[in-house]
Every structure is written in structure tokens, then in C-alpha cells.
Image (tube, helix red, strand yellow):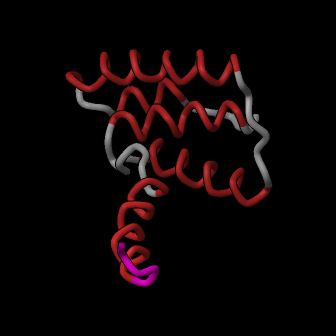
């Protein structure tokens, strides 16, 4: 039987990976998730401007991923706190300038 400290040492990296999972910043999935979260937070989203800044081959992938996020958001909308709202607003501004 493993001792508790050894067991914790083995399990901790795996648990950390589980909580950090999500779209990678800079990816089309991250952009789509950020746009979707902007709508959840009630922010003004320059979706057309963001799509225009994507490479042509990324636009179709963005549209598909964004549609999936929109359906999930519609079915289970989430509240957006002040700190998250400000973070998402900053990310949307950066995506619009990219």
C-alpha cells in the first residue's frame, strides 16, 4: 500500500492538469470561447472585426466552434462576475486589435 505523501505526490500533477484544461490562448477555439463568453457577460462583441482578423483557413473553424459554444451558452447561460467581465472585455479588445 502506498503511503499518503507518496500517493499525493503522484496524484497532484494529474489533478493540476485537469483544472488547467481548456482552449489554448491564441487558438481558434480560444477566440471562439472568448467571443461566446463576451456574449454571456453582456458585452459588446465586434465579432465581424475579430473574424476579419483571422486567417482565411481559420474562419470556417471559428464559425463551427463558435456555433457549438453558442448552443451550449444558450442551453446553460452562466453569470459573469465583475472580475471575469473585465478580463473578458480586455481579451475581446485584444482580439479586435490583433
Q: Position of residue 90 (x, y in %)?
A: 58, 55
- Name the image quarter holding the N terminus: bottom left
Q: Position of residue 48 (x, y in %)?
A: 48, 24
In the picture as drawn, the residue positioned furthest to the bottom comes out as 5
Q: Residue at x 37, y 51 (%)?
A: 25
Counting labels gives: 0
Give the extent of the magenta segment: 1-5
In the picture as drawn, the residue positioned furthest to the left comes out as 57
Looking at the picture, tell me which residue is in the foreground, 96 or 61: 61
Q: Residue at x 46, y 31 (%)?
A: 32
Q: Position of residue 16 (x, y in %)?
A: 43, 64
Q: Main secondary structure of the magenta part?
A: loop
Q: Is residue 4 magenta?
A: yes
The part of the image, by quadrant, that contains residue 17 is bottom left
Indicate whether 5 appears above or below 13: below
Looking at the picture, tell me which residue is in the foreground, 93 or 37: 37
Looking at the picture, tell me which residue is in the foreground, 6 or 84: 6
Amino acid at each position: 500500500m502506498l503511503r499518503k505523501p507518496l500517493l499525493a505526490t503522484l496524484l497532484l500533477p494529474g489533478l493540476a492538469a485537469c483544472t488547467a484544461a481548456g482552449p489554448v490562448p491564441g487558438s481558434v477555439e480560444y477566440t471562439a470561447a472568448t467571443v461566446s463568453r463576451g456574449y454571456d457577460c453582456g458585452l459588446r462583441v465586434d465579432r465581424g472585426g475579430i473574424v476579419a482578423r483571422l486567417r482565411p483557413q481559420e474562419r470556417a473553424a471559428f464559425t463551427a466552434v463558435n456555433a457549438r459554444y453558442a448552443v451550449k451558452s444558450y442551453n446553460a447561460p452562466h453569470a459573469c462576475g465583475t472580475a471575469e467581465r473585465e478580463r473578458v472585455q480586455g481579451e475581446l479588445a485584444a482580439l479586435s486589435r490583433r
